[in-house]
Amino acid sequence: MKLNNVDFDTYFKNYPNKEGYFGKYGGVYVSDELKEAMAEITQSYNTICKSAKFISELRRIRKEFQGRPTPISHLERLSESIGNGVQLYVKREDLNHTGAHKLNHCMGEALLAKYMGKKKVIAETGAGQHGVAMATAAAYFGLECDIYMGAVDIKKQAPNVARMKILGANVVEVTEGLATLKEAVDAAFAAYCREYKDAIYCIGSVVGPHPFPMMVRDFQSVVGIEAREQFLEMTGELPDAVVACVGGGSNSMGMFSGFLNDPVDIYGVEPLGRGEKLGDHAASMKYGTEGVMHGFNSIMLKDENGDPAPVYSVASGLDYPSSGPEHAFLHDIGRVKYETATDDETIDAFFKLSRMEGIIPAIESSHAVAYAMKLAKQMDNGSILICLSGRGDKDMDYIIENYGIQ
Ligand SMILES: *Cc1c(COP(=O)(O)O)cnc(C)c1O
């Protein structure tokens, strides 16, 4: 399949290119010192990811530790409630060990660290989900683990801080600036600059300088590869549409990569929060413009000075002012359509999936369900496959406090 001069038959060979670009997006916008460290990771990854030993070890871990393949569930009652024959299905990343897709790339990154002879993994975390997944992977491989986290987030996310500590990670409190995710990222990068001989930095999504957008996509592609095969086996056909929520963009890139070369409509769902005003949402592909942040060129939401804008979403995993460079590329060539769901639509979908299907989704994932329900109403019949990126256990307190029992 070809679109705007991009040949999807050979897509993964050509994107990103050697310099880490998807079209004009991506690259390595970091200090010379970090450039060297990134080049080391790129070179090691390009060799190690092709070795039969690495591939078979990762495959075994996916099966025996993570519990993969995760199933696809047919949402019979929710589909029936829409009433026009369109059938909804979910790929159950909520059933992946630790309850979300994040472990897919954390296990890959930690296994790479082991093959590179590193003793330590370094990461940042905002809400704590990436930190917990990283701490889990580090415990599994017996690696040291430093998780940089803002002081404000440490207070807010006590259960995840406890999880990381129980798993043996060292949670490093960051008190600079607003003491949230941005400062945690800066502190983790600075630590990595000091320690890169012994440590590897592990990013939480398909963002950051090359090779991370490529590497995280590759590790997450297990979601799309499994889903395509399972869906064909279940229904005898491909889905008409595939839908996933987009924060940094890792669960969506994993899912989409299985279907890019198929006659399937692909939708990324961004959080529209409280509305279209800058500061009330985090829909960067839909409302953003080209710019560089956190070491890569992509589409981003900027304030009046051209700096990353403050963003908001009911889902803490989606409130990032950009998304990975590959999303920006797929957006520009028109292969993926970027749509939105508001907080209200999302919470409605959260309760519908819980009550009609017995699946409590993460608020992040509920964005994808909300948009899929809107899309289904516009279709005559056919099928939609949704990536259910995670389970909602982490969101219980927030839901009860803010929405009560509806
Ligand atoms: C972190 C997270 C997300 C957002 O991250 P992506 O990189 O966009 O996938 C989505 N869903 C869940 C459950 C998460 O934990």
Image (spheres, rainbow, N blue to C red):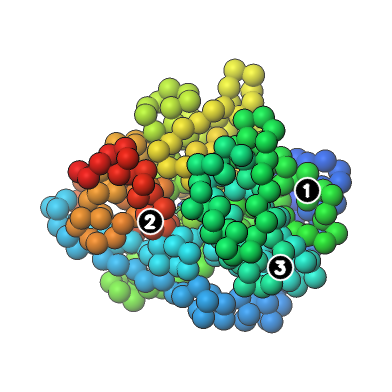
Mark 1 neighbour density, 10 Å: few (under 14) some (14–19) many (20 or more): some
Residue, disc 3: 143
> Which residue carries the number 1 mark?
191
Q: Do tag 1 and tag 2 residues touch (Cβ < 8 Å)?
A: no
Regarding residue 375, the answer to whether it shows in the image is no
Q: Of marks 1 and 2, which one's residue comes earlier in the chain?
A: 1
Helix or strand or loop: what does disc 1 sit on?
helix
Tell me the quarter of the image containing the C terminus: top left
The answer to which of marks 3 and 2 sits earlier in the sequence is 3
Q: Which mark is residue 393?
A: 2
Label 3: which secondary element: loop
Distance from Cα at disc 3 to Cα at disc 2: 27 Å
In the rendered structure, the answer to whether residue 232 lies left or right of residue 59 reads left
Q: Please, what secondary structure does the residue beneath circle 2 have?
A: helix
Horizontal and vertical percent for residue 32?
Answer: 86, 43
Rendered image quadrant of residue 44 = bottom right
Kind of residue sitting beneath label 3:
Leu
| Image vertical order of residue 341 relative to residue 384, above or below | above
Q: Is mark 1 within 8 Å of ligand 1?
A: no
In this view of the protein, which residue sits in the foreground, 295 or 66?
A: 66
Which residue sits at x=57%, y=77%? 61
Which mark sits nearer the N-terminus, 1 or 3? 3
Q: Is residue 300 above or below residue 55?
A: above
Image coordinates for residue 154, horizontal then vertical, percent: 57, 44
User: Residue 284 at x, y = what percent?
Assistant: 51, 35
Q: Compared with residue 237, is residue 384 higher up or lower down, i.e. above or below? A: above
Distance Cα–Cα, label 1 vs label 3: 16 Å
Q: Are marks 3 and 2 in contact (CB under 8 Å)?
A: no
Q: Amino acid at mark 2?
A: Asp
Q: Badge 3, how many Cα within 10 Å: few under 14, some, many 20+?
A: many
